[in-house]
């Protein structure tokens, strides 16, 4: 008579474990309303991280709404974080970054020692990372 009671206990434990797992997993699939998520602050500045892998120092400019503004200086072989003020991005949300090497002659033109990105569309809550490589043609820009 001892064997059937033990078997029933094992079946009872298995059923209890299965029920608790089913109930617990149902709680994990709660409906998340995307509309209820808080919106990023439209007046917050846009973080800009520059990783300068070159042996030159650069002055960084932002072309926004047809205007060029100096925002930073990044030294050789360093990584720095800057903030682009919201007034530069809130009208068209389009910016283009320029890096002009310190000590080079010429204007802000690619043929005169300046590297630039294409226009970048920036929305509130996003940030930019620009990697300047020793071979400037391999430099990258990313928006997250």
Image (cartoon, rainbow, N blue to C red):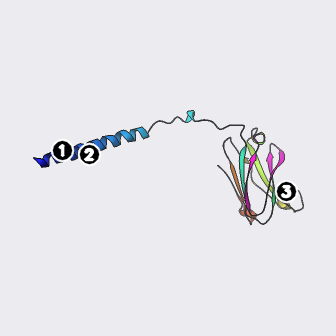
> What whole-number distance in Å separates the C-alpha atoms at marks 1 and 2?
10 Å
Towards the viewer: 10 or 37: 10
Residue 69 falls inside the magenta stretch: yes
- x, y percentage for residue 85? 77, 43
Q: Position of residue 116 (x, y in %)?
A: 78, 55
Q: State the residue at coordinates (56%, 33%).
A: 36
Secondary element under disc 2, as helix, strand or loop, is helix
Chief secondary structure of the magenta portion: strand
How far apart marks 3 and 2 lie (CA) works out to 73 Å
Q: Residue at x 74, y 66 (%)?
A: 135
Answer left or right for 132 relative to 108: left
Circle 3 SS class: loop
Comes first in the chain, label 1 or label 3? 1
Residue position marked by numbered label 2 in the rendering: 14
N-terminal of the pair, mark 1 or mark 2, is: 1
Foreground tag (3 vs 2):
2
> Disc 1 marks which residue?
8
Q: Could you say which quadrant of the image residue 19 lies in?
A: top left
Residue under the image location 85 percent in, 56 percent down: 109
Q: Residues within 10 Å of mark 3 (few under 14, many from 20)?
A: few
Q: Nearer the viewer, residue 137 or 4?
A: 4
Question: Vertically, is 74 above or below 93?
Answer: below
**Image location (x, y in percent) of residue 91:** 76, 38
First to last magenta residue range = 61-86
Q: Secondary structure at mark 1?
A: helix
Question: Residue beneath label 3, please?
Answer: 109
């Amino acid at each position: 008579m001892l064997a059937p009671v033990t078997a029933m206990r094992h079946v009872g434990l298995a059923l209890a474990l299965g029920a608790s797992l089913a109930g617990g997993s149902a709680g994990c699939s709660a409906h998340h309303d995307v509309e209820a998520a808080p919106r990023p602050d439209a007046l917050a500045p846009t973080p800009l991280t520059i990783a300068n892998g070159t042996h030159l120092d650069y002055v960084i400019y932002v072309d926004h709404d047809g205007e060029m503004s100096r925002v930073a200086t990044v030294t050789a072989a360093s990584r720095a974080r800057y903030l682009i003020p919201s007034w530069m991005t809130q009208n068209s949300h389009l910016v283009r970054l320029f890096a002009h090497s310190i000590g080079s002659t010429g204007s802000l033109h690619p043929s005169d020692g300046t590297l630039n990105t294409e226009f970048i569309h920036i929305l509130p809550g996003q940030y930019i990372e620009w990697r300047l490589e020793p071979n400037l043609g391999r430099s990258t820009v990313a928006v997250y």
